[in-house]
Image (cartoon, rainbow, N blue to C red):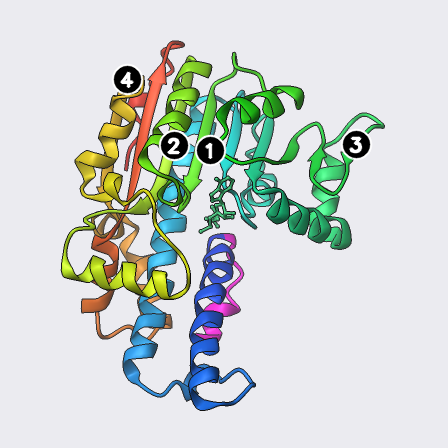
Amino acid sequence: MAKFLHHNDTNTFRATTKLTCEYNILCKQKGTESGRNRRPHVNQFASSKDITYLFSCLTGYYARVHGVNHLLDAFIRKTECHCQIINLGAGLDTTFWRLKDINLMPRKFFEVDFPTVVARKIHNIKTKPPLSKPIIETHSTDSLLLDAHSLDSDRYCIIGADLRDVSNLDEKLKKFQLNPELPTLLLSECVLVYMTCLQSSNLVHWAAETFHTAMFISYEQVNMSDRFSQVMVENLQRRHCTLAGLEACQSLDSQKERFLKTGWEHADALDMMTIYNMLPQDDVARIERLEFLDEKELLQQLLQHYSICWATKDKLNLGLSQLAF
Ligand SMILES: C[S@@+](CC[C@H](N)C(=O)[O-])C[C@H]1O[C@@H](n2cnc3c(N)ncnc32)[C@H](O)[C@@H]1O
């Protein structure tokens, strides 16, 4: 684990950030159970089941970051960077900074989340030069809009909005120079499942109507009708986390249907176990060694219950439907 945390590859960094949330939750649970306030070291977890769970999550995050980045980078390359990205429900995601680091910047990168989340992120950007510097470096004019609930520069923009209110979302994005004529990548990771299926279908439909050449990448749960998924849902409910859109997560087909019924021309979906098996195997072996992952059953179950679904429409005939794993 320590070796993994110190590995300086940006994918791993992002995976680690996401894992930290999971680790904190587990620590909190352990802290409460043992009546201690201090956070236990990973070695102090009581049962090897916890550790297996933690390392399985870490490997799952690794697969997710690699999988999503694979499609995202392929889209930007296909459009030769003449494109825009909208990360819906971006949270504290750091993709903009990764793309700047590898010199694969779209014309503009938009992020949308609830105003409270956006305010927290803007505060972080304002107070941390490694985050603010790339935004300033890629901004050419004097005026950089920055207030508590939005940030707008030439290449990066964060907007506070509720994704369930599509007309308000559309209005805000256009105010910040969203260009419907540009090839557009929309990304949602663990976001659509928090809305009802009607609300997520409205969002996905708005995207299909607004952009003539676009790709939508959605990462979230799948195969949510067995015993394992029931336990997953119960665990989330215990953390006051309700998944209102589970109906679309029944199968890979139901994931694709949401797009095919709302104006997208092509949709594909794979579960994360399949994607994990397609990742470069030397890298997979390295990660498994770092994580001491000798018990793979839980990992396989977790990976079988997450998927990446991607949909395209392609008026400019860029060949977007060929983007795959
Ligand atoms: C599980 S987090 C995922 C964050 C990010 N996509 C990632 O992968 O790191 C879900 C995010 O979606 C946001 N979200 C959920 N429902 C939303 C809505 N209706 N409007 C705006 N943001 C929403 C949450 O605030 C949260 O930041």
Q: Which residue has dot 2 on it? A: 199
Bounds of the magenta segment: 1-10
Element at label 4: loop
Nearer-N-terminus badge (2/3): 3
Q: Are marks 2 and 1 in contact (CB under 8 Å)?
A: yes
Nearer-N-terminus badge (2/1): 1
Q: Is mark 2 within 8 Å of ligand 1?
A: yes
Q: Which residue has dot 3 on it? A: 144
Nearer-N-terminus badge (1/4): 1
Nearer-N-terminus badge (3/4): 3
Q: Which residue has dot 4 on it? A: 265
Q: Which residue has dot 1 on it? A: 164
* Amino acid type of the residue tagged 2 in the rendering: Gln
Image position of 51 (left or right of 178): left
Residue 155 is labelled as: none
Element at label 3: loop
